[in-house]
Amino acid sequence: MSDQIIEILNYIIRGLEITGAGLLILGFIVATFRSIRQYIVNRTSFDIKNYRLALGRVVLIGLEVLVASVILKTIVVDETVQSLSFLVIMVAIRTILGWTMTLEMKGRWPWQ
């Protein structure tokens, strides 16, 4: 592959990494402020279950973008065993989090 294409792909990968991290940070802030605002408006106990679900969704979305960047990096730019193992770990974490979030939100495993 030409050096220009690899350089462009590196910019795309960097953009995806920044976007994924930004989604995690911004999502955490939004979920926290929404939960605090809901607590102040309702004057009831803090709804930790909804807060945890909101944070879980944020983590899943952020990880989706980060996994996409790792896939691109592994396949196109950095074809090493270390990058492949990092990809496997990222996908495993994403899968386990997805399963546990489905269990928590719906009360059943995804395959049930």
Image: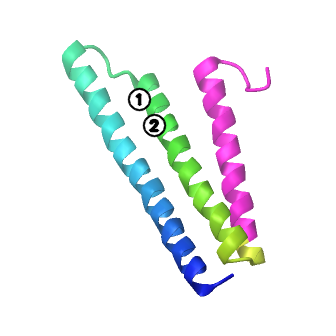
Q: Quadrant of the N terminus?
A: bottom right
Asked whether 60 falls inside the magenta stretch, the response is no
Q: Are marks 2 and 1 in contact (CB under 8 Å)?
A: yes
| Amino acid type indicated by mark 2 | Leu
Residue 23, image x, y percentages: 42, 49
Q: Quadrant of the C terminus?
A: top right
The residue labelled by disc 1 is: 51
Number of residues whose C-alpha sits closer than 10 Å to that of mark 1, classed few (under 14), some (14–19) or many (20 or more): some
Residue 59, above or below 53: below
Number of residues whose C-alpha sits closer than 10 Å to that of mark 2, classed few (under 14), some (14–19) or many (20 or more): some
Residue 98 falls in which quadrant of the image? top right
Residue at horizontal 52 percent and vertical 43 percent from the top: 61
Dominant SS of magenta comes to helix
Along the horizontal axis of the image, is 52 left or right of 94? left
Q: Which label was assigned to residue 55? A: 2
Span of residues in magenta:
84-112
**The residue tagged with tag 2: helix, strand or loop?**
helix
**The residue tagged with tag 1: helix, strand or loop?**
helix
Q: Nearer the viewer, residue 44 or 10?
A: 10
Using the numbered discs, state the Cα–Cα distance from disc 2 to disc 1 in whole angstroms: 6 Å
Residue 2, image x, y percentages: 64, 84
Residue at horizontal 26 percent and vertical 21 percent from the top: 39
